Amino acid sequence: MFQPAQTAGMFKRLAHAVNSAYQVLISGVVTDELTGQPPIGELTVGTSNVQLVPKTVASGLFCFAGESRRLFPLLATQDASVDFAITVPGYRPYQHQVAIPAGSSFPLPALHIMLQRMPIGIEGYVVEVTSAGSRPLAYARVRCLSAGSIAGVTTALATLRTALHFAHAAGTSVQACQLMQTNQASHLASKVAIGASVLVLWDELKLAAGDVLCVGTERVSEYVVVEHYRRDAHQPPVVQLTSPLTYSFDVGTSVRCCTAVVLEAQTTLARAVERGDGLLYLVAALEPAPSATVAAIDALKIVDGDHVEYHALDGLSDESGYYRLYGIGGAQVVTLGVSTAEITAQNQTIKWMIAYGQSMTSVDFRLLRTV
């Protein structure tokens, strides 16, 4: 793990790595946020400033070198800045701006940059093991109960059934809510692809900006927010969404209006998230109130200015017992749990080390009925 005491040795190693005509101006060390060790893979740093020379050496060290007088001729009286990017295969790209106050001397204090692993998906089957073999369990709910890394273990998590539409900063408001489908329903008149933000419907609906729609079925669905609704004569109704779709849907897919009931329980994000994430790290755990109706779906509402989104909680298995979780990351080890209303069972939790570097990993639940 990087320690500030390493700074002096870092400068010496970087100074030997660059052209003697240049001075090390900006330097730092890159580590994996989960392990505290250098990232696995080739480290690349770059900047649009052609007068800055990037250099990387072993152990995640990097620097930008150059002639400070040519690069920052007015630094004695004016602030300056440098933008740069870091990439490592298997990690999220990182972009950063270094502020250089007027009168600064070089090298600047060393940076410590922690890279995030690209999240993965987890899929598998939930079955009941019987004397006659195994039987798939539908409507089983799968979630992450805990997540651990060098930073510790947290249980203040929310597992989303569908991936996020937007990126959100730490501190963003997260509210428990329940989603209930109304009698207003239509179907898609044309296929929509991943990334589309317009729905063309067969039937007219009474919609307004901010209304919530469920596209798909309970197990394979996406909750979206209406930005604009247009109904022209002799033309099918068109819905403009506030965000691009995360999934694709075929012609004829169900589109239903939803009522969102916001509950008292609320918290904030403890960790920033990106579009496509499916596991939220929260400041405090949310415990949704028991639903007054079977039709209500436990969900979250994320409020971030104009970027408001709704997500059902937990992965849900289909008739074959298959489930899938999206965008799981931010931990080395997760404890997965399954619950089902059909049986009371043993073996309902599995501790799993996340295999980063692959897009999908398999975790099956084989439940034994409790007599």
Image (cartoon, rainbow, N blue to C red):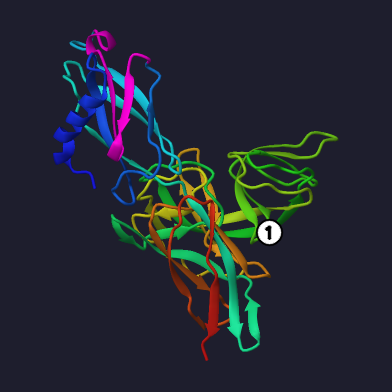
Magenta stretch: residue 59 in it? yes
Q: Residue at the spot x=34%, y=51% of the render? A: 34
Residue at the image position 68 percent from the left and 59 percent from the top: 217
Residue that protrudes farthest toward the bottom in the picture: 371
- With 338 as the anchor, is 104 left or right in this view? left
Spot occupied by residue 175 in the image (x, y as percentages of width and height): 44, 54
Frontmost residue, 219 versus 66? 66
Q: Which residues fall within the magenta stretch?
A: 50-73
**Does residue 342 appear anywhere in the picture?**
no
Name the amino acid, label 1.
Thr
Specify the quadrant of the image occupied by residue 265. bottom left
> Taking the image as drawn, is residue 311 in sight?
yes
Depth check, front residue: 141 or 16: 16
Q: Please tell me which residue is depicted at 32% across the width and 30% down the height of the picture.
A: 56
Query: x%, y% of residue 342?
Result: 60, 79
Q: Is residue 234 above or below residue 38?
A: above
Q: Is residue 25 left or right of residue 239?
A: left
Q: Is residue 334 part of the magenta span, yes or no?
A: no
Query: Which is nearer the eye, 308 or 97?
Result: 97
Along the line of sight, which residue is nearer the eye, 55 or 227? Answer: 55
Mark 1: secondary structure: loop
The image position of residue 201, as x and y in percent, is: 76, 44
Indicate the position of residue 191 as horizontal and vertical percent values: 75, 44
Category of crowding for the residue at label 1, using alpha-carbon neighbours closer than 10 angstroms: few (below 14), some (14–19), many (at least 20): few
Does residue 82 lie above or below 217 as drawn? above
Badge 1 is on which residue? Answer: 217
